[in-house]
Image (cartoon, rainbow, N blue to C red):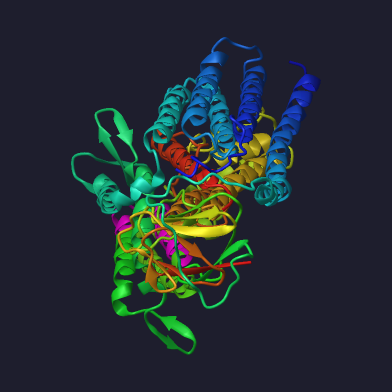
Amino acid sequence: MSELALFLVRFGFMAVLWIFIFSIIGVIRADLFGQRVVGKATERSVPQVLSTPIIPAAPSGAVSVVSSSAGRSSSIATRLVIVEGEHTGKELPLSGRELHIGRAPNSDLVIDDEYASTQHAKLVLMNEDWLIQDLNSTNGTYLAGARVGTPAVVKLNTPVKIGKTVFELRA
Amino acid sequence: MSAVSAPRIRQVVPRSRNIEAALLLFVAGINAYELAQVQLSTIQILRSDFWLYWAPLAIASLVVHMILRRKASEADSLLLPIGVFLNGLGLAEIYRLDLAKQAANATDLFATKQVIWTIVALAAAGATIWFVKSHLSLRRYVFIAMVVGIALLISPMLPIIGRNINGAQLWIGIGPLTFQPGELAKIALVVFFAGYLVSRRDSLAVVGRKVFGVHIPRARELGPILAIWVLSLVVLVLQRDLGTSLLYFGLFLVMIYVATGRAVYVAAGLSMFIAGALVASRVMSYVSGRFDAWLNPFDQAHYDAVGGSYQLVQGIFGLAHGGIFGTGLGGGLPQLVPLAESDFIVSSLGEELGMVGLFAVLICYVLIVSRGMRISFTHQDDFSKLLAVGFSFVIALQCFIVIGGVTRVVPLTGLTTPLLAAGGSSLLANWIIIGLLLRISDSGNKRGDA
């Protein structure tokens, strides 16, 4: 091959190399901005769209209501705040969909301690109330200090204890 | 589980897999370009054995891509293309060195072996993704991982199977096959450290006294650190390899730092390691020779000495010959450096691609490591976090030790450049690491907003 052709091939390769690098960086950029704009937008829009979420059949039809010190049942909780335990201060937004809690890594709220079960409990939205349902966990779920048997309504600012973690629902 | 009633706004084929497919096609094109450039500038024609070096990697990477589509559809989209790119670039350079050796009638050829190992390694990565359903199942094997890791580390010192190659006792050999078990030990040790630190994190981080504002852990918490320190010094003394021992000890220190957030462990560990290495450099001629060659490589006595700075200096001359834009693939003389295809692949590439090209290669490593760190952020549980941090950091530290050694930032040691250098064990271990990172990223992304 002639000198000129080799020269062009050489610099052509440099160009290809850096186009590759910049296309990867472009993907990372799209990733970041895609998540920030699209991810949050869909998340927020879910509660309004879903007026009547589907509730799986509860083991027993009875729903016991535990009174709490503060809280009006009319206002809907929008976030879950961890007030005690390993991830204190962390918040999870509540959309219309149910929320799985436990040690399983695909839970919405992962609680990694020895006192939590893999599928420990779940939070379900029914008629503007969040219900907590214990999924036959070994060590139980405690709502305002009392062990949850049948699915119970979680009022705002009422502590729910699972393992070493305590969280509350807040507006 | 939660998919039963939750509204899922999700495409059937995640976007990340399509990006990966596009990037893989791009990488296959780059590999073809490299090989064609090598053939055109060394033997002036395109020969049919071009396909032998191009097709296996392209096909194997597509197979792994298809496995990801089926088994880990939301895995990271960039790790596989970057890994294939580095593997292909290394293969092209090894092939280029083979052509130079064939012209000089030498027989120690590596490219065909590297092709075979590439297939084996990508198959292993695919099998990892296919059979390891969840990386959390690794947590059950934490103590098996410890035993396997230590057994792999000391196996080269055993009498019958141990082999001494180029002065380092790092290989085991059965018949004509040789293998570097220390590379696979990396994986076992990351799993062990992650599992161990998750269970001991609280006592390591909280228990202890404070003296002048510095947290002093209890003596019994320091036991395991001392054990790892002794193990890495044993590797240093008996296997005569500074790099390997630095790699494992550094890995442990970083993981303990990430798990506890206490810098005192890093400070204590580093000073212990430096003290040990200094004593070793006084006592052992091998270590002190490496230090002298590092500090005064251009000294004639060191240059001429057996095991002196000849190789290092030849590598530096190669880098200088390459300059900013390099000589072009096939245009330089990288075959003048001993072990140009394995330990010194970075200086070979630096000569032929120049600083501009070598920086692109370094950015690829930075991207792999940063993706690994990002994967660890997407997880909530500490075991997954530590696992991802450990795997990505072991790649980062190995790159630093090797490339730093070749460019005279740290003393030269005999480690391989991940994914790039000739060497089956290294390729196999690093592709399994990539496979595990892909597996971890899949479960991290599937859980939704993390």
User: Where, by quadrant of the figure, is residue A111 drawn?
Assistant: bottom left
At 61% from the left edge and 48% from the top edge, which residue is drawn? B366
The rendered magenta stretch, by its main secondary structure, is classed as helix
**Residue furthest toward the front?**
A62
Residue B119 vertical placement versus B180 (above, below): above
A142 relative position to B410: left or right: left
> Who's the residue at 30% across and 29% down the image?
B177
Could you tell me if residue B412 is visible in this image?
Answer: no
> Is residue B244 magenta-colored?
yes
Residue B243 lies left or right of residue B19; in this view the side is left
- For the question of whether residue B97 can be seen, the reply is yes
- Looking at the picture, tell me which residue is in the foreground, A156 or B223: A156
How far from the left and from the top, in percent, is residue B334? Answer: 58, 34
Q: Quadrant of the N terminus of chain B?
A: top left
Q: Which residue sits at x=65%, y=41%?
A: B358
Magenta region: which residues? B234-258
Residue B376 shown in magenta? no
